[in-house]
Image: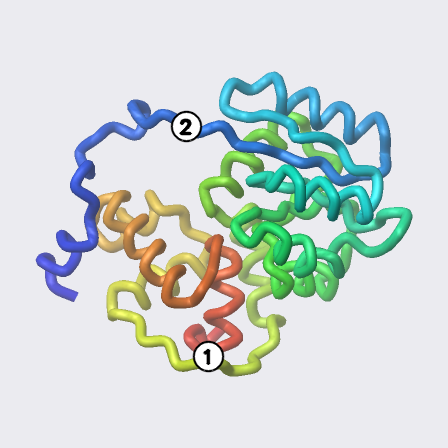
C-alpha cells in the first residue's frame, strides 16, 4: 500500500492528543448470580466518571429484559447461571442489542468453552480472580472495540476456531497487514510502530476491515477472518 493510501486512511484530527479526547459514558450491565461479586462490580463501575451501571441481573431471563430495555454498551457475563449457560446465550443477547460488547467472566473454563465464546461474538474474557481495577480496564477496552484477551491466549485459541467459509471479503494489502498483526495480539500502538504509521491510521484500517467483515470488535473480526480463510496460517 502506498504512503498516500495510508494518509487517506488517517482521520482529519490525527494530530489531536489522545488525552484531549472526551470519553463517552459507558453503560455496563453485570450478569452474575453471586450477590457480593455482582454488587461489588456494579459499585466499582458507578465510581468511575466515564461509566455507569445499568443494573445487575442474577439470571439469563433478567439479563434479556435488561438488555432489551437498557441497551448497555458492555455486559459482564458469567457463564454458569441458574437458568442456563451464559456463553450459549451470547448470540441471543447480542441480537437484542447488536452493538453491545460482551466480556465473559471466567473461572477455569476449557479452550473449547472459550472458543465457543469467541465464535458467539464475545469481546474477550476476564478471570474472576482478577482485581476490581482490572475490571474497569477490561470494560474500557471492550467499549473501545479492543480484544480483552492476552496475546498468549489469542495465539492458542485462534487455530481452534471453526473454518466454515462465507462471502468473499476483499481487504487491501494494508488491511491484511493490520489483520495479521491483530492476530498476534498486538495493540494499535504496536501495529503503528510495526507499519511506521500513526495510531489513528491503524484505527481507521481496523474500522474499515471490521466494517467489511461485519464485526463490532477486534476479537469478532479475527473470528470471522479465520472462519473465512483470511488468516490461513492461524
| Residue at disc 1, secondary structure | loop
**Residue 199 position within the rendered picture, expressed as x and y whole percent measured from the top left:** 27, 43
- The residue lying at 79 percent from left, 29 percent from top is 37
Q: Is residue 182 left or right of residue 74?
A: left
Q: Residue at x 74, y 48 (%)?
A: 64
Q: Quadrant of the N terminus?
A: bottom left
Question: Does 79 sit above or below residue 139?
Answer: below
* Residue 51 location (% of width, % of height): 55, 26
User: How far separated are the C-alphas under marks 1 and 2?
Assistant: 35 Å
Task: Identify the image's colour scheme: rainbow, by chain, secondary structure or one colour.
Answer: rainbow
* Residue at the extreme front: 69
Q: Quarter-wise, where is residue 56 in the image?
A: top right
Q: Is residue 3 left or right of residue 107?
A: left
Residue ranking furthest to the right: 82
- Counting from the top left corner in percent of width and height, residue 103 is at 63, 45
Which residue is under mark 1? 229
Mark sitting earlier along the chain (1/2): 2
> Mark 2 falls on what kind of element?
loop
Tell me: 94 left or right of 198.
right
Name the residue nearer the viewer: 198 or 61.
61
- Residue at image coords 19%, 38%: 14
Is 90 above or below relative to 30? below
- Residue 55 is marked as none
The residue indicated by pointer 2 is 23
From the image, state whether disc 1 or disc 2 is nearer to you: 2
**Circle 1 crowding by C-alpha within 10 Å: few under 14, some 14–19, many from 20:** some
Is residue 172 depicted above or below 82 in this figure?
A: below
Q: Quadrant of residue 170?
A: bottom left
Image location of residue 109, percent across then percent down: 77, 54
Residue drawn at (53%, 66%) of the image: 223
Amino acid at each position: 500500500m502506498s504512503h498516500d493510501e495510508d494518509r487517506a486512511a488517517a482521520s482529519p484530527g490525527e494530530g489531536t492528543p489522545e488525552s484531549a479526547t472526551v470519553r463517552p459514558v459507558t453503560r455496563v450491565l453485570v450478569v452474575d448470580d453471586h450477590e457480593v461479586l455482582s454488587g461489588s462490580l456494579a459499585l466499582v463501575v458507578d465510581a468511575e466518571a466515564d461509566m455507569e451501571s445499568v443494573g445487575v441481573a442474577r439470571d439469563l431471563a433478567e439479563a434479556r429484559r435488561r438488555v432489551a430495555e437498557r441497551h448497555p454498551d458492555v455486559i459482564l457475563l458469567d457463564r454458569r447461571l441458574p437458568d442456563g449457560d451464559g456463553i450459549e446465550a451470547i448470540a441471543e443477547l447480542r441480537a437484542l442489542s447488536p452493538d453491545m460488547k460482551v466480556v465473559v467472566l471466567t473461572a477455569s473454563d476449557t479452550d473449547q468453552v472459550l472458543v465457543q465464546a469467541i465464535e458467539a461474538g464475545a469481546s474477550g474474557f476476564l478471570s474472576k480472580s482478577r482485581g476490581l481495577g482490572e475490571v474497569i480496564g477490561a470494560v474500557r477496552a471492550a467499549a473501545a472495540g479492543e480484544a480483552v484477551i492476552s496475546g498468549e491466549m489469542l495465539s492458542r485459541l485462534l487455530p481452534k476456531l471453526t473454518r466454515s467459509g462465507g462471502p468473499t471479503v476483499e481487504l487491501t494489502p494494508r488491511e491484511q497487514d493490520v489483520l495479521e498483526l491483530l492476530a498476534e495480539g498486538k495493540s494499535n500502538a504496536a501495529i503503528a510502530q510495526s507499519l511506521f504509521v500513526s495510531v489513528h491510521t491503524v484505527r481507521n484500517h481496523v474500522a474499515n476491515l471490521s466494517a467489511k467483515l461485519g464485526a463490532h470488535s477486534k476479537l469478532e473480526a479475527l473470528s470471522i477472518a479465520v472462519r473465512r480463510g483470511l488468516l490461513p496460517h492461524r
